[in-house]
Image (cartoon, coloured by chain):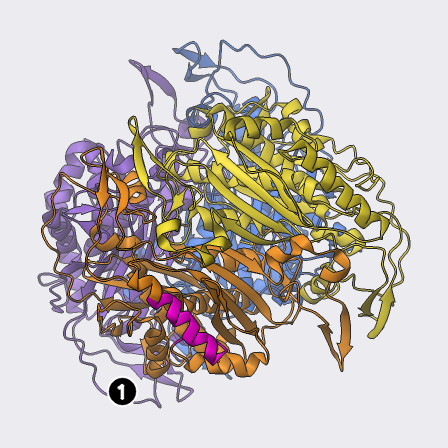
Chain colours: A yellow, B orange, C purple, D blue
Amino acid sequence: MKNTFGNAITVTLFGESHGPAIGAVIDGIAPGIEIDKEYIDNRMNQRRAYGKISTPRHEADEVEFLSGVFNGYTTGTPLCLLIRNMNTKSKDYDNLSRVARPSHADLTAYYKYNGFEDFRGGGHFSGRITAALVAAGAIAMKALEEKQIYIGTHIKNCHGVYDREFDDYFNDINMLSEAQFPVLDEECSEKIKLEMEKAAADGDSVGGVLETAVIGIPKGVGEPWFDTVESMLSHGIFSVPAVKGIEFGAGFDFSSMRGSAANDAFRYEGDRIVTKTNNNGGINGGITNGMPIVFRSAIKPTPSIFKEQETVDFKKKEDTILNLKGRHDPAIIHRARAVIDAVTALVIADLLTVKFGTDYLAK
Amino acid sequence: MKNTFGNAITVTLFGESHGPAIGAVIDGIAPGIEIDKEYIDNRMNQRRAYGKISTPRHEADEVEFLSGVFNGYTTGTPLCLLIRNMNTKSKDYDNLSRVARPSHADLTAYYKYNGFEDFRGGGHFSGRITAALVAAGAIAMKALEEKQIYIGTHIKNCHGVYDREFDDYFNDINMLSEAQFPVLDEECSEKIKLEMEKAAADGDSVGGVLETAVIGIPKGVGEPWFDTVESMLSHGIFSVPAVKGIEFGAGFDFSSMRGSAANDAFRYEGDRIVTKTNNNGGINGGITNGMPIVFRSAIKPTPSIFKEQETVDFKKKEDTILNLKGRHDPAIIHRARAVIDAVTALVIADLLTVKFGTDYLAK
Amino acid sequence: MKNTFGNAITVTLFGESHGPAIGAVIDGIAPGIEIDKEYIDNRMNQRRAYGKISTPRHEADEVEFLSGVFNGYTTGTPLCLLIRNMNTKSKDYDNLSRVARPSHADLTAYYKYNGFEDFRGGGHFSGRITAALVAAGAIAMKALEEKQIYIGTHIKNCHGVYDREFDDYFNDINMLSEAQFPVLDEECSEKIKLEMEKAAADGDSVGGVLETAVIGIPKGVGEPWFDTVESMLSHGIFSVPAVKGIEFGAGFDFSSMRGSAANDAFRYEGDRIVTKTNNNGGINGGITNGMPIVFRSAIKPTPSIFKEQETVDFKKKEDTILNLKGRHDPAIIHRARAVIDAVTALVIADLLTVKFGTDYLAK
Amino acid sequence: MKNTFGNAITVTLFGESHGPAIGAVIDGIAPGIEIDKEYIDNRMNQRRAYGKISTPRHEADEVEFLSGVFNGYTTGTPLCLLIRNMNTKSKDYDNLSRVARPSHADLTAYYKYNGFEDFRGGGHFSGRITAALVAAGAIAMKALEEKQIYIGTHIKNCHGVYDREFDDYFNDINMLSEAQFPVLDEECSEKIKLEMEKAAADGDSVGGVLETAVIGIPKGVGEPWFDTVESMLSHGIFSVPAVKGIEFGAGFDFSSMRGSAANDAFRYEGDRIVTKTNNNGGINGGITNGMPIVFRSAIKPTPSIFKEQETVDFKKKEDTILNLKGRHDPAIIHRARAVIDAVTALVIADLLTVKFGTDYLAK
């Protein structure tokens, strides 16, 4: 289904980095969800570039609602939101030359779209498109919060610096929802920023790992084959540029564990069944068990760096050297968390709507 | 879409561990693909239990083609394949008691299906269902090989023992296609089996990491949002029981790399553009770049162990102790590779059919 | 999505007329629906050939449940039902000759499947496949009846003979559910059978119009674009062989009406809003308004006739004459009603499950 | 899938009559299709109100391309087109009163969206939304014409006045593509307009039947179950407001025919197989046979009339009388043809892309 994702709630993304606008159409969202502009702006700000470690393309990123909203509430019809691109005056380009930026999609876009792609600034592959995803996700996230379902993401590690574990999920997520730089341990924050600045000083970049928790999700959600909670989340998350890995619960650490340590023992806590450990990240057999969903996403270093890079000019059909100019982020991981949060909210909202029907989120 | 997956080629899985049969319906597969029973049986054998490290449920696993095959070739209409369950005589069960096996889906199935699930042997969540997936995948895999697209999976590591890297992809994959125990380094094979046997001796189990390579796939395949190659593969792979993580190319190792080391430099090799490294695992921006697709799947230890486990009886609504009896695999990772291969083949076949049309695979 | 249809409840059909079996996989059906074999058999009988006006291929049509049923109830996992083909021993066929039966799919199947199609008896295009559809529909229909939603279809007209209008929907539908020959007016029944027998005597065939009513469906079901109730029903109904038209409410008669006569006036009947007329067939803007859904399906005359027909041999690439032998139905309209009922039940069940969630049908 | 339709090419519609804008996202359209603004404007004009028989809401209907177009060609990424609503300043409305216009969707929208719907001017159910559909369809239609596939629709009958039959499809379609009032017989044009004006003079409205032909479509396109050409076309066509019936080829006339008259005899015309008659409307078994696809759509009379109508106020919960004011079309059938053409083009483009791959339309 290409640029549309979801079963009961679908999101369709459109737009190019240097085109007139980017946007999203959310379909299947329940009627009666409040559109809280302040809430959305807060999420948009978390994604926005800022400070020494981010690029100075200052997009106002004003979210315009073209449809599906009436008197401040969702109508239940397709909600189209639009973000106009500013400052996109493209310089003239030479049609005889196209230099592929390594680890970007310049070359694969050319392969796929036969040269008709809007290549300016990465076009449809640009991280800029995620602004629309964040706005869309914020609507779902707000609706989930009304049902006491909360989502939060922090930088688990960045170039060797590790944040602390989630401790009290509710409070930690609450803290993250207000934090511009998403770490749980304040000290760690400075260390990570230092890594980013060091990379910047070298004309280089860093990646990292984001960890996401979802609490309050009802048990019994998801499908065994093929729409497991892991399948749906990973499908969405891997659409986010720079994501190259995802693991749930103990994830890759399972490979050095034995079953006796890996298994999550069940026990009653009052009427509720909980697990003593949560190595399965809240999911058994693809279905939620009521424990927090926990997963981690691997983010590769920003491909745009200022060091000289070997590459090809695929119009001239020759090897060449790339020296990027301008300003680029030495890291996007702190901004990517807003995108991961957004995708997570949309997927969870979709899974719940499949199970409980189209009015559920606003009930 | 629940139990159906794919865009142009869809697979629908059905069946329960102790029901009459399991099976799959493949729809959208090109007419004119040869059904090679020996080839399919070989893949089925790779998944089958064997030797000291596997359970003795000896299923004949005879694949019966109910539709979509005529004169030994696919017709292009839905292909239903069936595998009858043998020896499934269920013992009487006590309806007043249901003990949840930790890290299995017993409890979540109960949550989801309100007690109507066929819980015998894990029901629809049983690893047994993957036999149908392997048979379905074998048909796609054979068709891909006719187009010089090859897929192979080996145990990358198991409880601390690491196999060697892929070296010559073509030869390594070829070797794996014949190997019952899927490792590249023969010595490593013995060490891993030893880990499995040690776990077995302790009534315990081990997990590991599987690494998969796909070579020969055309460039320009996949979609930016939301059907990236990573999205589609992960969606399918996470449906396989016990998979809890997936990473492409350098994956989680990106977190300690800088962009200058992470980026894959392009260069011409004759007319063809290749990359010097393959940290992106053959995929840029969600689209194939013509390099091998490489990914790793984290497999958790088999949940069924013989050590005493704390859990709940959710019919009696009380905490209890579980002591499993019978025989269970101390590891399923060596068998799981056949399932990973199958899912990979189906996803790749689907992506190619989307791009090149419904006759492509048999042309 | 080809051979799969539906959003929340999907049906996948497979099988060929002369292959080992035909069947269906229903996915997304709620757990806890009773499987009433007598009920299913009754619906199967309505579709089965009988008497002077139908062919003597006596299929036992035993429905076998391979999955998704446990202790007599649906489990909520994919339900695969199978009907074995009997007496399908094919005579040898000459590979150098293929004569296209006019108005059948022999030639278009050849175009589409490049000669790999199983052409025996119409293969996957055979009306026989509808037996699986009827069995699948019966499960949905029974569940709908538990919710006081009833579906019934009668022959509205056949070769100039018209049945009476629906009068008391509930009683009429109840009567039809027990009738082997589906007309409301007993006298009309004889007249229609006479038309069929006259056609048979001439080696010819007749078609007709089926009229279907659905009562008790909740209001507010359906989607404006593009899954209107009309869109979903017509999508399903046009898959039934021989259907060439569908109209809702006044349908084509609207073309000679003025708005003042066509519009359905609303009024309160107690707390409930009803319409004085039902020219819109229970649907406004694609959404149910609580009045009976009424639609009519045009069924073309059975293409298999015993008169000499001009056609082509597309293997020999020459014009030829076809003289069919054996026995064929002079009409299938009375049997087709069971198929229309089944598709209607599946579509209505799907629409309700989308709106009210996956457990709705068994609640 | 609600507001998204299609398999390989999907269209997502959004917008409300009195909201800021309406629009469509087309996804999966091949890269390299020329965007011909004049061509699109011509199709938009065919849908636009004009003359004595249409309303004076003069929308400029400027189509704005927000994404998916670069240098005048489609890029292959999602194409979002937008049409701003002008003159939509809504008058204040009384929240205590809502009068349901008969045969409109006011009441069913309220049922479905729980009162959150944007009810002004019919909201998302307004015929105005079809402007976006026409713009989207024009892009597909132009691409089809490059492949010698042509689509044309005329008024087959309107309130008792019948247009002539299609004669020379190519020339007739060509003529229709330039005609503002879509009839084949010029005399008939005046008679139909007279019917419309007479209805207008009475404060009333008329409906009719539209007939569509598609020529040049390759043979072997479509799927037996469930995506027959008839299924896909009807699914799309029934989303168009006011459509209440569709029939292919002889359609409902089959009910009075015998098989010997109904069957279309095949014969060779050079190398090509044609049929002597085309009662099946170019489709056998749901698959194209290479003959023109012919279908008719029943359009109900415009529900907005100036005669007094009985209805309900569903906020006040009482019966009431409706006296519409302002100006409304006495007929929309001549404008609806542009919408039918558009949906047809999108469905045909989708079916071809499924079969021949994502680049087909621009090759």
Circle 1: residue type: Tyr
> Would you place residue D276 above or below residue A46 in this image?
below
Out of D233 and B299, give the one closest to the viewer.
B299
User: Label 1 belongs to which residue?
Assistant: C93
Q: Pinpoint residue D236: horizontal percent, then vertical percent.
A: 49, 48
Say if residue D166 shows up in the picture.
no
At a point 42% along the width and 63% down the height, the residue shown is: D223
Instruction: Decide: few, some or many residues near mark 1? Use Cα within 10 Å; few <14, some 14-19, many ≥20.
Output: few
Q: Pinpoint residue B160: horizontal percent, then vertical percent.
A: 48, 63
At a point 65% along the width and 66% down the height, the residue shown is: B220
Out of A300 and A198, give the one closest to the viewer.
A198
Magenta highlight on residue B190: yes
Magenta highlight on residue D230: no
Q: Pinpoint residue A324: horizontal percent, then vertical percent.
A: 86, 56
The boundaries of the magenta stretch are: B181-197
Q: How many marks?
A: 1
